[in-house]
Image (cartoon, rainbow, N blue to C red):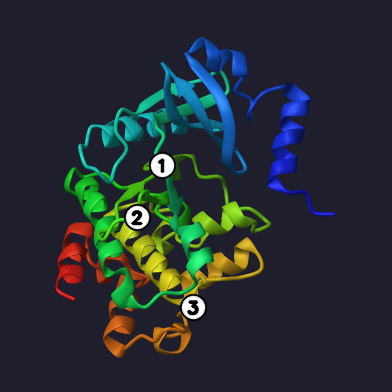
């Protein structure tokens, strides 16, 4: 019988009484009172908690090499210095006995993954304002020579209450620095990040602004079709798809329809070679504004 992620979390806590190796007493000593779990991955747990009387989103990560953990903390703190409504503010990033933790003010909303599951595929005209809202904070990162590195449906929060112009929050910038090795099985969490990893990153060349552009292209394809452009039953299949396969054209794959111009636009974002894509989100924002 397959074990669910919730069962794994319960097992971890039953074994050592801690969320992913970070003791609740340690978090209490730092001023956090845990309220409820929001989600989890192979080595990370996201929770609601109170800090100094305010509700926060607390992400704890364990098992990372110290060098990677420190790079992640630096990336998180640098991103936190960028003032933009689409990026978290008042971010706290600190080491724990078992890894690292990041806290930010909790905001109500729905991830794009949940929204896509609820609404199904969309037409390009329905999501242009949403795409613009995602690119603005991503452009703010790129303008400061930073990358997000973990852009996918689960890391874009569409904020409540709904508005004529969508408001989004990009979550977990820098999380690629703590990304686990390519897993043998592909569960919900693994599918989220593996679906959007750029070919150059899979080849070991790291993450650059054009890698975020690739992830954005994958996200657009998912919103228009309801499925991943690069899929497989195993992690190896997904990696090979990123490196060697061409997705089904949107003119066939998008249930709500997509013209040749939309197909060409999205294809330009998911080119295998980074130099063939828009160089960063700022350039891409101009393309979206012109549509």
Q: Which corner quadrant of the image does residue 83 belong to?
A: top left
Marks 1 and 3, how far apart in space? 29 Å
Residue at image point 54% right, 70% down: 240
Q: Residue at x 63, y 30 (%)?
A: 20
Circle 2 or circle 1, nearest the eye: 2
Tag 2 secondary structure: loop
What is the x, y in percent for residue 236? Answer: 61, 64
Residue 198 position within the rendered picture, expressed as x and y whole percent measured from the top left = 41, 61
Q: Which residue is mark 2?
A: 162
Judged by depth in the image, the label closer to the viewer, 2 or 3, is 2
Contact, mark 2 vs mark 3 (Cβ under 8 Å)? no
Give residue 82's quadrant in the image.
Answer: top left
Tell me if residue 195 comes above or below residue 171 in the rendering.
Answer: below
Is residue 119 found left or right of 12 in the rendered image? left
Q: Is residue 263 above or below residue 219?
A: below
Q: Residues within 10 Å of mark 3 (few under 14, many from 20)?
A: some
Q: Which residue is mark 3?
A: 245
Asked which secondary structure carries label 1, the reply is: loop
**Rendered-image quadrant of the N terminus:** bottom right
Residue plotted at (24% across, 46% down): 141
Give the vertical position of 148 relative to 32 (above or below). below
Is residue 41 depicted above or below 1 in this figure? above
Q: CA distance from mark 2 to mark 3?
A: 37 Å
Callout 2 crowding tier (Cα within 10 Å): few <14, some 14–19, many ≥20: few
Q: Quadrant of the C terminus?
A: bottom left
Q: Earlier in the sequence, mark 1 or mark 3?
A: 1
Q: Which residue is mark 1?
A: 172
Whether the residues at callouts 2 and 1 have beta carbons within 8 Å, the answer is no
């Amino acid at each position: 019988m397959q074990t669910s992620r919730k069962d794994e979390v319960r097992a971890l806590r039953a074994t050592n009484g801690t969320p992913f190796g970070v003791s609740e007493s340690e978090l209490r000593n730092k001023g956090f009172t845990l309220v409820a779990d929001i989600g989890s991955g192979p080595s990370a747990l996201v929770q609601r908690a109170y800090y100094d009387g305010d509700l926060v989103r607390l992400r704890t990560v364990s098992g990372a090499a110290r060098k990677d953990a420190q790079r992640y903390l630096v990336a998180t703190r640098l991103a936190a210095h960028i003032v933009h409504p689409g990026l978290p503010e008042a971010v706290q990033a600190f080491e724990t006995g078992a890894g690292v933790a990041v806290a930010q003010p909790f905001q109500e909303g729905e991830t794009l993954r949940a929204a896509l599951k609820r609404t199904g595929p969309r037409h390009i005209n329905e999501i242009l304002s949403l795409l613009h809202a995602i690119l603005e904070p991503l452009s703010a990162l790129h303008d400061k020579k930073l990358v997000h590195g973990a852009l996918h449906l689960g890391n874009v929060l569409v904020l409540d209450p709904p508005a004529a112009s969508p408001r989004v929050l990009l979550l977990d910038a820098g999380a690629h620095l703590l990304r686990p090795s390519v897993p043998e099985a592909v569960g919900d969490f693994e599918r989220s990040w593996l679906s959007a990893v750029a070919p150059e990153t899979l080849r070991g060349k790291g993450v650059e602004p054009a890698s975020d552009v690739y992830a954005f292209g994958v996200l657009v394809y998912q919103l228009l079709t309801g499925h991943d452009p690069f899929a497989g039953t195993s992690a190896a299949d997904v990696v090979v798809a990123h490196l060697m396969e061409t997705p089904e054209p949107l003119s066939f794959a998008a249930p709500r329809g997509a013209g040749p111009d939309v197909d060409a636009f999205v294809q330009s974002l998911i080119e295998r070679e980074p130099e063939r894509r828009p160089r960063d989100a700022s350039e891409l924002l101009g393309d979206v504004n012109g549509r």
